[in-house]
């Protein structure tokens, strides 16, 4: 099978278009629902034949849904490692579904239904992971879009459900609503003012957790944090959403205040630091992934502070995705060594910034 993401609007990354609320601080909102099909062993214990039957049953049901326009079924288990990595880099599938780690090898029957901002992963940790991705801080919109798909699909496919515990899932922390809501947020102001430690500690005290750009197991790089609920049992979807909206709203206020403090108290120092980041991206000949993320973080902050004009947040958001290893290898049309990847990354970023802004200044 050949992966053709051009069949999706903007290649499946329209969620980076900076159209949502607080998009200068929040890149995206994601809501996931874990579901299992009644009558089958959970994915980790299921045999190949069971997983394929789950795929067939879900596939037939999804074809009848009205809320999945321009849908594209991708058999992940029929893709090569580079194409699977591209799906992961675009946040369209999890690392587990893509089979990118030795502890989670590629499973038979692994597939994903992709639509504009909506997707259904099949045979991940659970039989189904329904996902909604929205630009900016849009938790209610993300959940509303997903809830419609969940209800339609649940009317056609029997989900594993317990009257006392709620939806049954492979991991106990997902039992109940099966919902994991998260916000990908950029917090350079809090990092530079050294307030970030207290903010993150406060999140954990309220039962929330934070991770890096790619969620569980990923390190924080470029001042990008993914904030999400930690448990689902005993609380309704509305309660979980209300808490996350309230807490993330407070974090956004703290970040905006930190940016004002930086401009007020260290204006020329910050301006110099951010312009140096921009200059490095414009002229560097080799960039590691961490370097690119950190410099892009600086330029994104500069655009948010209106120190640099003529660059769109959308372009900077897309650079976070398209400057990663699998995308660069696809652009070059061949596998790349680490040093070749660093050269290709610098070349790609230089060209993108030149095309977008020309002589910014």
Image (cartoon, rainbow, N blue to C red):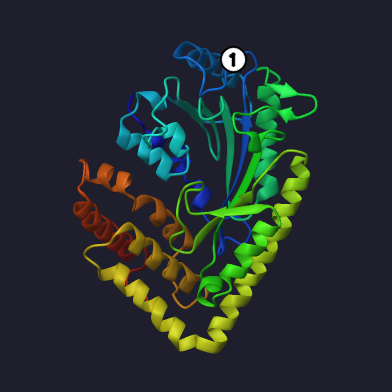
Residue 163 percent location from the top left of the image: 80, 24
Q: Position of residue 168 (x, y in %)?
A: 67, 27
The x and y percentages for residue 106 are 39, 27
- Judging depth in this view, the residue of 24 and 193 nearest the camera is 193
Total numbered labels = 1
Q: Nearer the viewer, residue 101 or 327?
A: 101
Q: Determine the residue positioned at 34% across, 35% down.
A: 83
In the rendered image, the vertical position of residue 105 relative to residue 304, given as above or below: above
Residue at point 38%, 37% (across, down): 101
Left/right placement of residue 229 relative to residue 123 reads right
Horizontal side, residue 232 vs residue 361: left or right: right
Q: Tell me: 204 left or right of 77.
A: right
Q: Quadrant of the N terminus?
A: top left
Instruction: From the viewer's perspective, tell me whether residue 168 is left or right of residue 331.
Output: right
Give residue 319's quadrant in the image.
Answer: bottom left
Instruction: Name the residue tied to disc 1.
Output: 40
Look at the numbered disc 1 and give the secondary structure of its residue: loop
User: Could you say which quadrant of the image residue 89 lies in?
Assistant: top left
Q: State whether residue 216 is above or below residue 125.
A: below
Residue at (54, 66) in percent of width and height: 187
Q: Residues within 10 Å of mark 1 (few under 14, many from 20)?
A: some
Q: Where does the C terminus fall, quadrant-wise?
A: bottom left
Residue extending furthest toward the right: 164
Which residue is rendered at x = 55% and y = 40% of the image? 117
Q: Percent position (x, y) of residue 199?
A: 63, 67
Residue 214 visible in the picture: yes
Asked if one can make out residue 248 in the rendered structure from this viewpoint, the answer is no
Q: State which quadrant residue 147 falls in.
A: top right
């Amino acid at each position: 099978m050949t992966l053709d993401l051009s069949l999706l609007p903007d290649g499946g990354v329209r969620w980076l278009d900076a159209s949502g609320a607080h998009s200068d601080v929040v890149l995206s909102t994601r809501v996931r629902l874990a579901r299992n099909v009644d009558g089958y062993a959970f994915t980790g214990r299921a045999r190949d034949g069971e997983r394929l039957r789950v795929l067939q049953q879900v596939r037939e049901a999804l074809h009848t849904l009205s809320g999945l326009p321009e849908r594209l079924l991708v058999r992940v288990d029929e893709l090569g490692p580079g194409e699977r990595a591209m799906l992961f880099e675009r946040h369209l599938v999890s690392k587990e579904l893509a089979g990118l780690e030795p502890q989670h090898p590629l499973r038979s029957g692994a597939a994903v239904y992709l639509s504009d901002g909506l997707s259904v992963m099949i045979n991940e940790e659970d039989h189904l992971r329904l996902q909604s991705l929205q630009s900016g801080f849009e938790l209610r919109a993300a959940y509303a879009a997903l809830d419609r798909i969940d209800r339609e699909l649940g009317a056609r496919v029997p989900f594993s459900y317990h009257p006392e515990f709620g939806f049954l899932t492979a991991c106990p922390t997902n039992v109940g609503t099966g919902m994991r809501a998260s916000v990908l947020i950029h917090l350079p102001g809090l990092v530079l003012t050294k307030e970030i430690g207290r903010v993150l500690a406060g999140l954990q005290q309220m039962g929330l957790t934070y991770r890096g750009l790619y969620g569980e197991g990923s390190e924080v790089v470029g001042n990008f944090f993914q904030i999400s609920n930690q448990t689902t049992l005993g609380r309704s979807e509305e309660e979980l959403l209300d808490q996350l909206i309230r807490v993330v709203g407070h974090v956004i206020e703290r970040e905006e205040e930190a940016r004002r403090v930086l401009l007020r108290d260290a204006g020329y120092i910050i301006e110099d630091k951010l312009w140096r980041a921009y200059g490095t991206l414009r002229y560097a000949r080799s960039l590691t992934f961490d370097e690119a993320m950190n410099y892009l973080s600086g330029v994104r902050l500069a655009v948010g502070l209106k120190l640099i004009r003529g660059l769109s947040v959308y372009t900077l958001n897309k650079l976070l995705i398209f400057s990663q290893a699998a995308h660069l290898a696809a652009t070059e049309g061949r596998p790349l060594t680490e040093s070749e990847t660093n050269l290709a990354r610098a070349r790609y970023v230089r060209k993108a910034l030149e095309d977008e802004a020309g002589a910014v200044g």
